[in-house]
């Protein structure tokens, strides 16, 4: 089961990094007047639709979900398979 936890953790780390890249690489450009000329007006007008709750999703995954998975990973050497499975399941349902 450790390989499952390892894969979940690695996938979540990549997901969090991708979300961060979108926020830092794209979303903040919408707040920079220097960048306005590069962004079509229809896109600028729809920033809230495009990025609506992306910061909230990022914050949840970066600070809560990823942290929980890291704790399971760090503790998976001592726990048995059932408790690891229950811990992973609780990550998905407790929030």
Image (spheres, grey):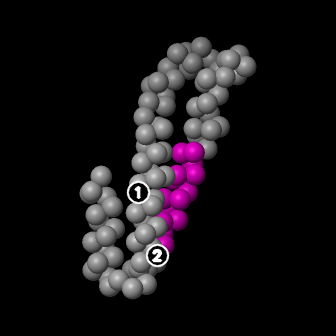
**Foreground residue among 41 and 25:** 25
Which residue is drawn at the image coordinates 59% and 14% (left, top)? 41
Is residue 50 something that shows in the picture?
yes
Asked if residue 16 is among those painted magenta in the image, a careful observer would answer: yes
Determine which of the numbered discs, if any, sits on residue 91 in the image: none
Secondary-structure class at tag 2 = helix
Disc 2 and disc 1: Cα gap in Å? Answer: 14 Å
For mark 2, does the 10 Å Cα neighbourhood hold few (<14), some (14 to 19), or many (20 or more) residues?
few
User: Where residue 29 appears, x then y in whole percent?
Assistant: 64, 28
Task: Name the image quarter holding the N terminus.
Answer: bottom left
Q: Is residue 38 visible?
A: no
The quarter of the displayed image where residue 19 is located: top right
User: Between 72 and 2, which is closer to the camera in this rendering?
Assistant: 72
Q: Nearer the viewer, residue 66 or 25?
A: 66
Residue at figure coordinates x 51%, y 23% from the top left: 47
Where residue 50 appears, x then y in whole percent? 49, 28
Q: Is residue 20 left or right of residue 36?
A: left
Q: Residue at x 48, y 38 (%)?
A: 55
The residue carrying mark 1 is 65
Which one is in front, 77 or 81?
77
Residue 51 vs 14, above or below: the answer is above
Q: Dot 1, how many residues are within 10 Å of its Cα: few (below 14), some (14-19), or many (20+)?
A: some
Q: Which residue is mark 2?
A: 74
Q: Is residue 80 left or right of residue 25?
A: left
Q: Of label 2 and label 1, which has the lower sequence position?
A: 1
| Residue 15 magenta-highlighted | yes
Residue interval drawn in magenta: 5-20
């Amino acid at each position: 089961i450790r390989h499952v936890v390892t894969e979940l953790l690695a996938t979540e780390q990549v997901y969090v990094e991708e979300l961060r890249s979108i926020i830092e690489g794209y979303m903040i450009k919408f707040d920079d007047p220097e960048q306005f000329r590069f962004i079509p007006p229809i896109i600028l007008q729809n920033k809230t639709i495009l990025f609506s709750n992306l910061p909230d999703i990022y914050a949840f995954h970066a600070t809560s979900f990823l942290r929980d998975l890291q704790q399971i990973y760090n503790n998976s050497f001592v726990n048995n398979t059932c408790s690891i499975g229950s811990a992973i399941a609780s990550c998905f349902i407790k929030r």
